[in-house]
């Protein structure tokens, strides 16, 4: 009995865990590559190359 429950929970967690992680990945990719966020990421990509003075 306990082995059947364990196997059922294992299959459920492997299947729906993989689906959950895939959905989170897709949402993160959409968040990152959404067209309205391009300006923010372009600015962040260029900020280390800026001409501002470095103060210590």
Image: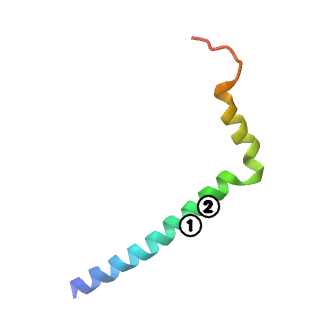
- Mark pair 1, 2: CA separation: 6 Å
What colour scheme was applied to this rendering of the protein? Answer: rainbow
Quick one: label 1, few (<14), some, or many (20+) residues within 10 Å?
few
What residue occupies the far top of the structure in this picture? 56
- Give the number of the disc on residue 4: none
Q: Residue at x 67, y 29 (%)?
A: 47
The foreground one among 4 and 19 is 19
Residue under circle 2?
27
| Residue 45: image location, x then y, percent | 66, 35
| Residue 13: image location, x then y, percent | 39, 74
Direction from residue 31 to residue 7 in the image, left or right = left
Q: Residue at x 43, y 76 (%)?
A: 15
Direction from residue 33 to residue 19 in the image, left or right = left
Q: Quadrant of the N terminus?
A: bottom left
Q: Are marks 1 and 2 in contact (CB under 8 Å)?
A: yes
| Residue 44: image location, x then y, percent | 67, 35
| Residue 48: image location, x then y, percent | 64, 27
- Give the number of the disc on residue 23: 1
Q: Residue at x 67, y 14 (%)?
A: 53
Q: Is residue 5 above or below residue 27?
A: below
Per the image, label 2 sits on a secondary structure element best described as helix
């Amino acid at each position: 009995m306990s082995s059947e429950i364990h196997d059922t929970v294992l299959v459920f967690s492997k299947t729906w865990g993989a689906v959950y992680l895939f959905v989170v990945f897709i949402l993160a990719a959409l968040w990152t590559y959404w067209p309205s966020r391009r300006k923010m990421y372009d600015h962040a990509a260029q900020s280390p190359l800026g001409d501002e003075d470095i103060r210590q």
